[in-house]
Each structure stands twice: as structure tokens, then as C-alpha cells.
Image: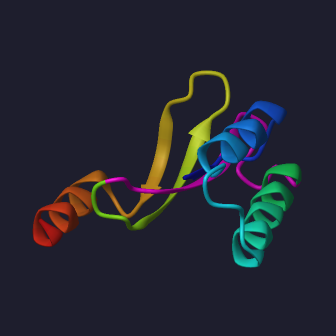
Amino acid sequence: MSFSVGSATAVALVQAESAPHPLNEEQRSLIKAVKAVNGAALFGQDNELSYLVDRNSRQPVIRIVNKSTREVVAQIPSQTVLELAGKIKG
């Protein structure tokens, strides 16, 4: 599940990925919070906040992504930590 809610296509992505499981209140609140952060341009005009759940480790991931290049500028937790968590859960 991915919440990169800076554009209409991102909202469509969220809806498409979560279609089998309707969004609960917590997820809706999270989407609103991400929209507010992106609307305020807190990470600059070129970047947006995105939230997703890693498929392997099932851990939440926060990313700052460049809007034009889609390059990940920063990520918490790092990819290394996610891979480690995935291996531990095995």
C-alpha cells in the first residue's frame, strides 16, 4: 500500500492498491496528513512525502521523493533495515 498523495494519480494508486480492503479510519487520517504536508510544501516545491508498507517486511516506510524524477531523496527506515527485517521474518 502506498500513500504518495501529492497528485490525483497518487490518490488513484492508493485506491487501486487497496481495493480488496477498504480504507479504514486510520488510513484515511494518514492520507489526509500526507496531503496536508505535501500541500504545505514542507519538503520544498520539488519533493513530496510518501508513505507505504514494505511488501517483504510489512513495515511502514516514509519517503521523501522528488516529484519530477521520482528519485527517493530520503527514506525511513533505510532499505538495508527493511531487507534485514524481511530476512528475520523469513
Count of numbered circles in the view: 0
Q: Nearer the viewer, residue 54 or 44?
A: 54
With 55 as the anchor, is 9 left or right in this view?
right
Q: Which of 77 and 30 lies nearest the eye of the viewer?
A: 30
Q: Residue at x 67, y 38 (%)?
A: 13
Q: Residue at image x 62%, y 60%? A: 21
* 70 is higher (above) or lower (below) than 27: above
Q: Residue furthest bottom?
A: 26
When the figure is inspected, residue 52 is found, relative to residue 73, above or below; the finding is: below
Measured as percent of width and height from the top left, residue 34 is found at 75, 59
Q: Residue at x 29, y 63 (%)?
A: 57
> Where residue 83 sits in the image (x, y, percent)?
20, 56
Q: Name the residue nearer the viewer: 44 or 20.
A: 20
Q: Is residue 50 left or right of residue 57?
A: right
Q: How is the image coloured?
A: rainbow
Q: Is residue 51 magenta?
A: yes
Apparent side of residue 50 relative to residue 71 in the rendered image (left or right): right
Question: Residue 68, position in %: x, y?
Answer: 66, 22
Query: Which residue of the protein is positioned furthest toward the top in this rendering?
Result: 69
Instruction: Report the span colored magenta.
Output: 40-55
Q: To which quarter of the image does residue 26 belong?
A: bottom right
Q: Is residue 4 above or below residue 57?
A: above
Q: Is residue 2 left or right of residue 88?
A: right
The image quadrant where one finds the C terminus is bottom left
| Residue at horizontal 77 percent and vertical 42 percent from the top | 11
